[in-house]
Amino acid sequence: MKKLLAIAAAMLMAAGCVTESGDVKEAVFALQTGNDQLAIKWSEDLATDSTYSKTLGLVEAGRVNMLAGRYDAAESWFRQAVDTAVDRKEAQPKLKIGDMANTALSATVTDDRTRNYYLPAYELNLALEYGIIAELMNGKRDDALADARLAVYVQNALADEYGADVAKTAAGASQDAQGMCSEQSARLDELVAESSNSWENPVLWWLTGVMLDQNGETEMALASYRKASVLSPGNPYTSQRAPAADKSRLVVIYDQDFVSRRKSLKVPVPIYTMMSIDIPMYEDTPYVPERVRIAGSKGEAEAMPTLNVQALAARDLKEQLPGIITRNLTRAATAAAAQAAVNASGNSYAKLGMMAVNGVAMAIRRADTRSWVTLPMGQQIWSDSEMEPGDYQIGVNVNGAVYTTQVPLKAGKTRLLYISHTTNGFRGGNCEL
């Protein structure tokens, strides 16, 4: 009996404890220290061997291969990832929202880690962005243009469909869930401050504008530029046009480090004594952009922070909290009902046994902390559409660390320079649009 009571007490002591995945930490550390092969194996195993996280593995594999300079592999993985959320077989593409808004109350018996992983809106948009960059790096301009047009459709569809689903989920949560959502959402407010929603990506809008503009699709390009400007006000690069026939344009996308990882947090349930639920949470400070200066044709100029990935990730979590908490409260209610039934039997040993069973279940349960962890914390952009054609040695200065690369520019053409900066230095490449 003492052992049973000790187990139940341990469950209570676990409240407030935070944990995170060891495999994820190891994979990110591998990238930070230049051990790309270990990270590639982790991501591709996730994409091919996992039961519930295959889709997450697809984007992780795409991103890790991209960082390793393996653009062919990255393109393939990203295409598979996008195809899990977008049906391209019809005359018009169709967005497969599925469980994206986390509204379904399935899997209430076990825990959220046994739910199939669906790409949330911000991850889908970044899969599109990186897939387009990989296609461009592979010289597949027509494929990249097709996916740029797809990205315009996807972001507009997400605003209409996913945005409405998020609002519906929040409104449909129980009063108890809404109360707990409010308390936990307050912890995310500092992180989400620089985002208005999780389903629009200003860098993706800008990149589609750049590509469509270079291709002569002026009307669609201007619409994309406008979207980017609204999401990144005061940014001088989001509305800069394609080069004149005798000039060249260089555009830069810069990735900073890696996004914060979600952790499992135990939270006591006020309405059920001696019970707790597990929810994912961030415990990190907001993203602080590095100072990035690009040495182009007119001396150094500052790049502009344009996408706060950490804010989008936290915003996505905040949008999912009503569904997450509702499912967990449903599990708690099931456990409480079972405990009440045993209590009513008058059997003290059965009562303590059920208490211990519930305690063990809650102690070992963890929240679903799955998210795309090899994303950057944020992205910055830079552009110059009035450069003279020729060969340039472009310098990128980040807080004193300098990356240089040779960039050939042709008259009337636009060239993309993509750079990622992590603990072990710079990675990057450039290609013509």
Image (cartoon, rainbow, N blue to C red):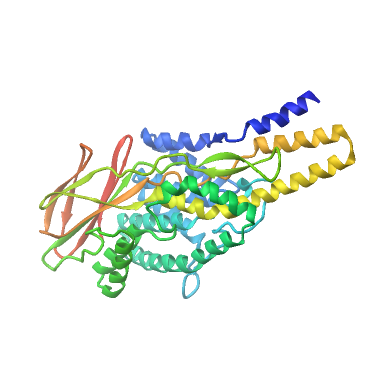
Left or right of residue 27: residue 303 = left
Residue at (37, 47) in percent of width and height? 66
Residue 73 makes an appearance in the image: no
Across and down, in percent, residue 372 comes to: 46, 47
Residue at (45, 54) in percent of width and height? 123
Residue 17 makes an appearance in the image: yes
Q: Quadrant of residue 203?
A: bottom left
- The vertical placement of 275 against 104, above or below, is above
Left or right of residue 160: residue 336 = right
Nearer to me, 380 or 422? 380
Across and down, in percent, residue 306 comes to: 31, 54
Left or right of residue 160: residue 365 = right
Q: Which part of the image, by quadrant, shows the N terminus?
A: top right
Nearer to me, 334 or 130? 334
Residue at (45, 66) in percent of width and height? 159
Nearer to me, 41 or 317? 317
**Count of all numbered marks drawn on residues in the image:** 0
Nearer to me, 315 or 228? 315
Residue at (47, 75) in percent of width and height? 91
Across and down, in percent, residue 51 comes to: 60, 47
Across and down, in percent, residue 171 comes to: 58, 62
- The vertical placement of 155 against 53, above or below, is below
Q: Looking at this rendering, what residue extends furthest in the right direction?
A: 346
Left or right of residue 131: residue 164 = right
Q: Looking at this rendering, what residue extends furthest in the top direction?
A: 2
- The vertical placement of 140 against 53, above or below, is below
